[in-house]
Image: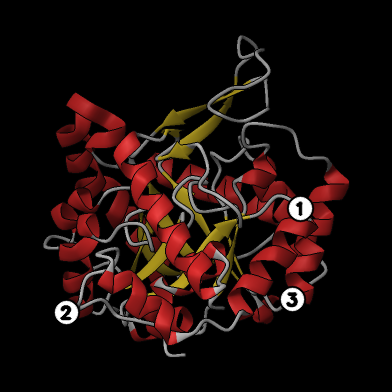
Amino acid sequence: MHSASNARLASLSTLGFGAAPLGNLYTQVGDEDAHAALAAAWENGIRYFDTAPYYGHGLSERRLGEAFAAWPREKFAVSTKVGRVIEKDATRSAQINDGFAVSGSSAVFDYSADGVRRSFEASLKRLRLERIDILLLHDIGSLTHGAKHQAVLRQALDEALPAMARLREEGLVGAIGLGVNEQEVCLDVLPHFDLDCIMLAGRYTLLEQDRSRELMQLALARHVKILVAGPYNSGLLASASAPGATYDYAPVDAATLARARSIYDACAAEGVDVGAAALQFPLAHPAVGTVVAGMRSSAEVLSAAARRDAAIPATLWRRLQAAGMLPSDAALPAS
């Protein structure tokens, strides 16, 4: 890891603002609500914001840019992503496109060196910034690309990642990494390319750690910071009262739901909000730099900030270990 990148990653706020919802993820978010959410984030000490061109086909970045214009640049950090370019597309007229309530555009995969540069320059304009703190290569891996995975991986190693490294060398980017949902592609890339960080969504959480174990160990050895996203596992652990209905962006299966219910039972016995445990648990791992939660309103920001600050007794973690919900060697938060 580059020393300058290391310093920037070490200074990230423990709670990051996931800005996919501000791109109208699944449903529309009004401008006033988006602005109120960002104002509340600032007021509650959140200083790291994660976005991508894909999120609302530029809408999330534009909304962040409006807020950034009023904030001291040295006081916050932002990550965005490359790997897709946004193109006008009049045929995209449905209410929901690519999971976002936007129309008239398409997000097209492009892992070429030219695509990386074009995507990055467009992001700078939307964000109203001259540089980006963290640039992530978005959604490589077999879960996304299936039979095309090996070809995408080859282009990522040959073109996209070297182009991102050049942006880092030019001082336009502070740190580079991956933004993915699976550890396997991280294990494919790390032996071949010098990354500063990896944003891993949904794989190192209160609910599950098995599908990130090898990566977490490798990240520690290689001094690669893990930015944990999706701490609520697609909404399964988001509610304070009971498990949600979705996991990995799909209806939850019976076995995973039963595991979630066991976590809720343990938290209820200790008088702890599951969401607070879900936000705080990943931060105890020495490879983790921040936890990023999606937020679409000031109410969700206030809830996340309260969960970040909640006192959690050590007895909860021991109870979860005794019930087999956490491994005996898990890194646990100090209480």
Q: Amino acid at mark 2?
A: Ala
Residue 237 badge: none
The residue closer to the viewer here, 182 or 241, is 241
Query: According to the image, label 3 marks what residue?
Result: 44
**Above-or-below relation of 81 to 139:** below
**Whole-percent x and y of residue 40?**
79, 67
Q: Residue at x 36, y 45 (%)?
A: 258
Q: Position of residue 130 (x, y in %)?
A: 63, 65
Circle nearer the N terminus (2, 1): 2
Q: State the residue lying farthest toward the front.
A: 269
Marks 3 and 2, how far apart at CA: 33 Å
Q: Nearer the viewer, residue 318 or 12?
A: 318
**Secondary element at image label 3:** loop
Q: Position of residue 90 (x, y in %)?
A: 65, 12
Q: Which residue is at the front of the view, 186 or 181?
A: 181
Point 47% across, 58% down: residue? 264
In the shown orientation, is residue 284 left or right of residue 85? left
271 over 257 or under it: above or below: below
- Report, in whole angstroms, how far the alpha carbon at label 3 lies from the one at label 1: 13 Å
Q: Residues within 10 Å of mark 3 (few under 14, many from 20)?
A: some
The amino acid type found where label 1 is placed reads Ser
- N-terminal of the pair, mark 3 or mark 2, is 3
Image height check: is 220 above or below 268? below
Q: Answer yes or no: do the residues labelled 3 and 2 have beta carbons within 8 Å?
A: no
The residue wearing badge 1 is 297
Residue drawn at the location 20% of the way across and 42% of the way down: 153
On the rendered image, what quadrant is the N terminus found in? bottom left
Query: Which residue is rendered at x = 33% and y = 61% of the image?
Result: 204
What residue is pinned by disc 2? 221
Answer whether residue 201 is visible to the viewer in this image. Answer: no
Helix, strand, or loop for circle 1?
A: loop
